[in-house]
Amino acid sequence: MLDLDTLSKLRFGMSEVPKIGGQRGAYEEKWSQWFLERSFFRDFVYRNPRGKKKGEELTDAVVLFDDVMIMVQVVQVKAQCGRHDPICHRLQHLARIICWSRLVMG
């Protein structure tokens, strides 16, 4: 049986399997990007595309395959903080991104 490193090198241009650890949520983001590259090839996956403003990230990954666009956002869920629900807040942010992308894409 092949280990993950050998398996990832079988596909052309694959990234290395992400190492566990580091900043909270970073491993999950890198793993999801690696998984998308395995599924759609690296040529179709765009990691951390820039947003409208300088230094802003549009999403964690975008897959452009033929006439289909898949946007992936990895969210770390925490207990409710303050007066707003973090999941609701993030969904509102993603809704604004989708509306903006519709305007840009036409």
Image (spheres, rainbow, N blue to C red):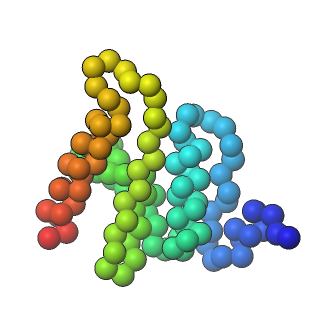
Residue 87: x and y, percent?
Answer: 35, 37
Please give left or right for residue 1 compared with residue 10 in the image.
right
Q: Nearer the viewer, residue 45 or 70?
A: 70
> Can I make out residue 88 in this image?
yes
Q: Classify residue 8 by image quadrant.
A: bottom right
Please count the marks in the image.
Answer: 0
Compared with 10, 23 (above or below) is: above
Residue 40: x and y, percent?
Answer: 51, 73
Q: Classify residue 90 by image quadrant.
A: top left
Farthest top residue in view: 82
Residue 70: x and y, percent?
Answer: 37, 65
Q: What residue is at 62 percent from the left and 36 percent from the top?
A: 22
Please give left or right for residue 5 compared with residue 92 in the image.
right
Please give left or right for residue 68 compared with residue 6 in the image.
left
Quarter that holds the C terminus: bottom left
Compared with 29, 89 (above or below) is: above
Q: What residue is at 52 percent from the left and 48 percent from the top?
A: 29
Please give left or right for residue 30 compared with residue 84 in the image.
right
Q: What residue is at 85 percent from the left and 70 percent from the top?
A: 1
> Can I make out residue 54 in this image?
no
Farthest bottom residue in view: 66
Residue 48: x and y, percent?
Answer: 42, 53
Q: What residue is at 78 percent from the left and 68 percent from the top?
A: 6
